[in-house]
Image (spheres, rainbow, N blue to C red):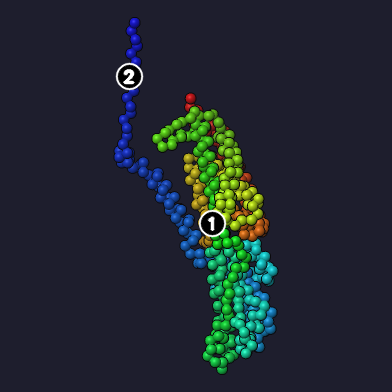
């Protein structure tokens, strides 16, 4: 009885060497162009918004308060407080740079507490009387002009406002000094020196925030954590689901596996990924709060509101990423990176005020998620969760962004399914 001869084993395909492939010019074109474009775009976007914030100023809101109740000096029709605030508001030097908002003290305090202004310049009640006393023996202290900052809107914004207000106050002091020295020509040299620059400028915080608030930057970094949590989490879920359903290979170190392909439509796949994003975001949001507040001690109040807002923000970003990945496929991660990170960070207005960035970034701030979310977080952390401090806008944009992501994502997947554009042909086990 003869036995069948087994067929010869197929000879292994010859291995291609990297050196041989590297000599093919076409292999270099796509990655080279993409790397160059991404690097150029990121460099211009990130650095373009911070290179020169002072020259980019456009109507930075600052409160201007005339609280002076003194009588006008001899020969003048208005007291010095009115003269100074009128001159500052009408100054050509700050006409386009600063939006001077003339308020009374209660209005100023409300504007600071709601984050409507980055700071304030105040001419106090006794200013004219203090200036008049300098030319008599009744002078006890130098007249002052108060400069208030609002660190809840960021340390850079407070610094810019302090510089603007201090410069305006110094200019006002020199103008007053010219009037005083002209009226006191016979005064001794020491008095003449005092009268030449009579006003003292005092700078203090107008709306305090907690010591563990990163000088007003904790809201930005906390928001960044939420956006990164939603962005990275959605991409991890996207990869994990594709691997589990057999639409992507699993490769860990030298180990490579490919699971049987599960027959499922694009629409149902997107629904599954979005559902997992909604559920897993509960964990990621809770961990962000535990790590930043409980472990690191970040100052935070209204914790239930903060958790709910953080969760909804993370879900909105995650759902948006899933929609973009479903629509654009392999380049979806790059597209979502530009939408949620590259364009969002420089237009967030959290480190550099939007009013101190070029017009392109102010345009992006209208719809980019980071600006809307950071405004909501900032309202909760620094401004007593006031709706008019950015919280209402944050909630509205979360709702709008989620609705747009759902509509865009499912519209694209249903279109692909109707056209029969299936992701892969099912593979046998």
Which residue matches tag 2?
8
Residue 239 placement (x, y as % from top left): 50, 38
Which residue matches tag 1?
347
Judge whether 138 appears above or below 85 on screen: below
> Which of disc 1 and disc 2 is earlier in sequence?
2
Q: Residue at x 66, y 88 (%)?
A: 74
**Which residue lies most toward the top here?**
1
Where is residue 380, by image quadrant? bottom right
For the question of whether residue 61 can be seen, the reply is no
Residue 398 placement (x, y as % from top left): 62, 49
Residue 243 placement (x, y as % from top left): 49, 34
Judge whether 365 appears above or below 109 on screen: above
Nearest to the observer: residue 304 or residue 82: 304
- Element at badge 2? loop
The quadrant the N terminus occupies is: top left
Q: Residue at x 45, y 31 (%)?
A: 257
- Element at badge 1? loop
Where is residue 188, by image quadrant? bottom right
Where is residue 407, by image quadrant? top right
Judge whether 354 appears above or below 22 on screen: below
Pointer 1 local density, CA inside 10 Å: few below 14, some 14–19, many at least 20: many
Q: Residue at x 69, y 79 (%)?
A: 69
Report the mark closest to the observer, 2 or 1.
2
Q: CA distance from mark 2 to mark 1?
A: 65 Å
Residue 367 placement (x, y as % from top left): 58, 53
Pointer 2 local density, CA inside 10 Å: few below 14, some 14–19, many at least 20: few
């Amino acid at each position: 009885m003869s036995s069948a001869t087994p067929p010869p084993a197929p000879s292994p395909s010859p291995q291609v060497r990297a050196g041989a492939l590297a000599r093919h010019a076409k292999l270099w074109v796509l990655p080279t162009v993409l790397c160059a474009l991404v690097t150029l775009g990121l460099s211009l976007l990130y650095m373009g918004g911070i290179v020169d914030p002072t020259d980019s100023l456009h109507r930075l809101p600052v409160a201007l308060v005339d609280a002076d109740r003194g009588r006008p000096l001899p020969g003048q029709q208005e007291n010095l407080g009115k003269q100074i605030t009128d001159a500052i508001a009408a100054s050509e030097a700050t006409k386009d740079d600063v939006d001077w908002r003339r308020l009374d003290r209660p209005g100023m305090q409300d504007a600071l507490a709601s984050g409507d202004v980055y700071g304030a310049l105040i001419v106090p009640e006794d200013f004219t009387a203090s200036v008049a006393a300098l030319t008599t023996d009744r002078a006890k202290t130098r007249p002052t002009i108060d400069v208030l900052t609002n660190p809840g809107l960021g340390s850079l914004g407070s610094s810019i406002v302090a510089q603007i207000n201090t410069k305006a106050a110094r200019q006002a002091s020199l103008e007053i000094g010219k009037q005083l020295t002209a009226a006191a020509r016979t005064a001794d040299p020491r008095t003449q020196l005092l009268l030449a620059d009579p006003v003292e400028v005092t700078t203090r915080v107008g709306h305090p925030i907690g010591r563990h608030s990163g000088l007003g930057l904790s809201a930005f970094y906390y928001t960044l954590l939420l956006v990164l949590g939603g962005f990275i989490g959605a991409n991890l879920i996207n990869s994990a689901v594709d691997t589990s359903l057999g639409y992507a290979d699993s490769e860990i170190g030298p180990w490579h596996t490919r699971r049987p392909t599960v027959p499922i439509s694009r629409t149902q796949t997107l629904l599954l990924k979005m559902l997992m994003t909604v559920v897993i975001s509960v964990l990621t949001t809770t961990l962000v709060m535990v790590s930043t507040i409980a472990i690191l001690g970040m100052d935070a109040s209204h914790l239930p509101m903060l958790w709910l807002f953080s969760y909804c923000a993370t879900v909105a970003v995650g759902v948006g990423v899933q929609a973009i990945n479903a629509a654009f496929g392999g380049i979806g991660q790059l597209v979502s990176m530009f939408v949620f990170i590259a364009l969002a960070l420089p237009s967030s207005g959290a480190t550099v005020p939007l009013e101190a960035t070029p017009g392109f970034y102010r345009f992006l701030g209208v719809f980019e998620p980071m600006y809307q979310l950071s405004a909501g977080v900032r309202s909760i952390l620094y401004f007593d969760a006031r709706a008019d401090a950015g919280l209402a806008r944050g909630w509205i944009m979360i709702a709008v962004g989620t609705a747009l992501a759902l509509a865009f994502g499912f519209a694209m997947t249903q279109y692909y399914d109707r056209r029969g554009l299936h992701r892969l042909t099912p593979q046998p086990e």
